[in-house]
Amino acid sequence: MLLGTIVNFSAIIVGSLIGLLVKGGVPEKISNTIMQGLSLCVIYIGISGAIKGSNVMLIIISSVIGGFIGELVDIDNLLKKLGDRIENKFKGRGIKISEGFVTASLLFCVGSMAIVGSLESGLQGNNKILFAKSMLDGVASIIFSSTLGIGVMLSSVSVLLYQGVITIAASGLKAILIQSVITDMTAIGSLLIMGIGFNMLGMSKIKVANLLPAVFIPIFYQLILNLMR
């Protein structure tokens, strides 16, 4: 059941290692331009997924409720603290971890392929989407780790836990995870990807991690509908 997620986890590690090896040979000017280009691509990916949402009102309500829950827990701060804690262990070695860890974890976890791929893996045992995502994440890891450092590699653990939990939980939620629910979850995740892109460009400081609970609100909405019938 977890084969697709394990392959994805491994691809990020391999890609990050390659990126770290070539990091010293990429001038800062070129790295900055590449990051700006990647940021625009991230925004495009977010837009293309967000417009597929089928229930605009539910997406808005999910964002409000999810943001409220996320701020109460302060997921963004917890992720940064975790990154900073790891970074402090490498203090004095010139290694920056927090930014790469948080950015890559969010980017690799909240996308439509992460959500839909994990659901298909759990519901049908179909890992095709996660295998395709593994290739994309592997290439992205090379580029991101060459600019953001070793924190990108550590994001592989976030992917393993996040996709693993969704995959395992999906098998027990077959009655709720109908196509409209999956579509709305994907749309919300895509909106968060747009936020990541804007943050990468320095245009905003959206606490994307604090909006993560919004992705799962459509599941509870469908559960309530099922109970009312």
Image (tube, helix red, strand yellow):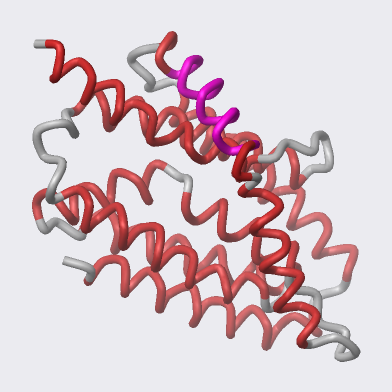
Residue at horizontal 66%, vertical 51%? Answer: 38
Residue at horizontal 14%, vertical 56%? Answer: 126
- Image spot of residue 129 (x, y percent): 27, 53
Is 82 contained in the magenta span? no
- Image spot of residue 3 (x, y percent): 22, 71
Tell me the quarter of the image containing the N terminus.
bottom left
- Image spot of residue 123 (x, y percent): 12, 49
Relative depth, front residue between 179 and 216: 216
Residue 220 left/right relative to 124: right
Whether residue 104 is situated above or below residue 7 in the rendered picture:
above
Relative depth, front residue between 102 and 196: 102
Residue at horizontal 53%, vertical 34%? Answer: 46
Q: Main secondary structure of the magenta part?
A: helix
Whether residue 215 is situated above or below residue 15 in the rendered picture:
above
Whether residue 185 is situated above or below residue 158 in the rendered picture:
above
Tell me the quarter of the image containing the C terminus.
top left
Q: Residue 193's image quarter? A: top right
| Magenta segment boundaries in residue numbering | 59-71
